[in-house]
Amino acid sequence: MIASTPATLGRRSLRGEHALRLGLFGANCSSGRYITTLPERWSASWDDNLRMAILADEAGLDFLLPIGRWKGYGGETDYSGTTLETITWATGLLAHTKRISCFGTVHVPLFHPLIAAKQMVTADHVGEGRFGLNVVCGWNEDEFAMFGVEGKDHDGRYAQGQEWIEVVTRAWTEDDFDYAGTYYQLHGVREKPKPYGGTRPILMNAGRSPQGRSFAVRNCDALFTQPGNAGFDPVGLAAAQNLLERTRAEAAAVGRTIDLYTNGYVCCRPTLAQAEEYLRYVCEENADWQAIENMMGMRGLLDGLSPEEADRARRRFASNSGGFSIVGDPDMVAEQFATISRIGYTGIAFTLVHYADDLPYFASEVLPRLERMGVRSPS
């Protein structure tokens, strides 16, 4: 577990005093999080990312959270096949923004901790303390195979992750130390400069399993999580609230507190009918069904289903492959965000069909409503 030295304190949460912190999720990946063939789908080009980041910064959003991907899912669009590496992506965006925080998403088996620590300190100095780390201990085995890295079992991933995060945080706070672990044997470690302002970057983890939650509550400032049946129905909200309460209790048991974030898909239009019609256009009429099939097959989500059950599962996955579906007019969307705050989430990273084109309407219509509801402080 990370020790609470002065250098690890003082930056425990994102800037701002909002009841619900808002960020954009997955903009470094082509198509974002919508698995669609639309010609106007998100490109993930640098120009589009830069425009998105400046708009988000000016609107007062809190953070940008990328997805670490190395290989697409195939299909007509090769969904998520074009991606920008997350630490260099964050560094570039931090140089062009003033207030918003940018995370890097790092896969433990692919990054040596000392190289990663140096890269992230560089990003942190560029952003004057606005860099955050989302540490991922495991991922898709076919991507690891591309690097010639053999995947470990579930417990082994988190054992390596524990050593990795210990090395990184010690490199950020100490000089001239040795480290003797199972996965890393290091001698005479010295890295300068240290993170910006004498505090370390915010640490986030997205583990869903009991081991993942345990890793997060011992080591991280934030856990990015949601129940398997996330939704606004009573069952879904109760499951989410129960998960949050259990996670906070686990953190309290080891003398820590932890922020809890989730993710979602947003489709906001002037009327509910327009939002639902556009969502059908994006996610049904123009879905990349082969990419959806590939993703679900990789995760075992179609195993044991009848043809009818598999068809229903594909259609659900096409419009929401994880997290909350936030759909409607501005009043409805604001109320759904408020509900997420009321059940106990600290923040949400959400996806728009086209981040840069859709964000101005969201910022002008939804954010003022959230301010009036007390969910967000005035920008």
Image (spheres, grey):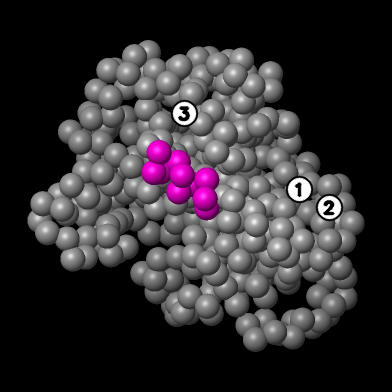
Q: Residue at x 54, y 28 (%)?
A: 338
Q: Which residue position is annotated with label 1? A: 12
Disc 1 versus disc 2: distance between alpha carbons? Answer: 6 Å
Specify the amino acid type for callout 3: Gln
Disc 3 versus disc 1: distance between alpha carbons? Answer: 26 Å
Specify the amino acid type for callout 2: Leu
In front of the other: 128 or 160: 160
* Comes first in the chain, label 3 or label 1: 1
Q: Secondary structure at mark 3?
A: helix
Tags 1 and 2 touching, CB below 8 Å: yes
Q: Which residues are magenta?
A: 234-243
Q: Residues within 10 Å of mark 3 (few under 14, many from 20)?
A: some
Q: Residues within 10 Å of mark 2 (few under 14, many from 20)?
A: some
Magenta stretch: includes residue 240: yes
In front of the other: 264 or 127: 264
Q: Secondary structure at mark 2?
A: loop
Specify the amino acid type for callout 1: Arg
Q: Secondary structure at mark 1?
A: loop
Q: Which mark is residue 336?
A: 3
Q: Residue at x 68, y 59 (%)?
A: 251
Relative placement, left or right, of 367 versus 3 is left
Q: Which residue position is annotated with label 2? A: 9
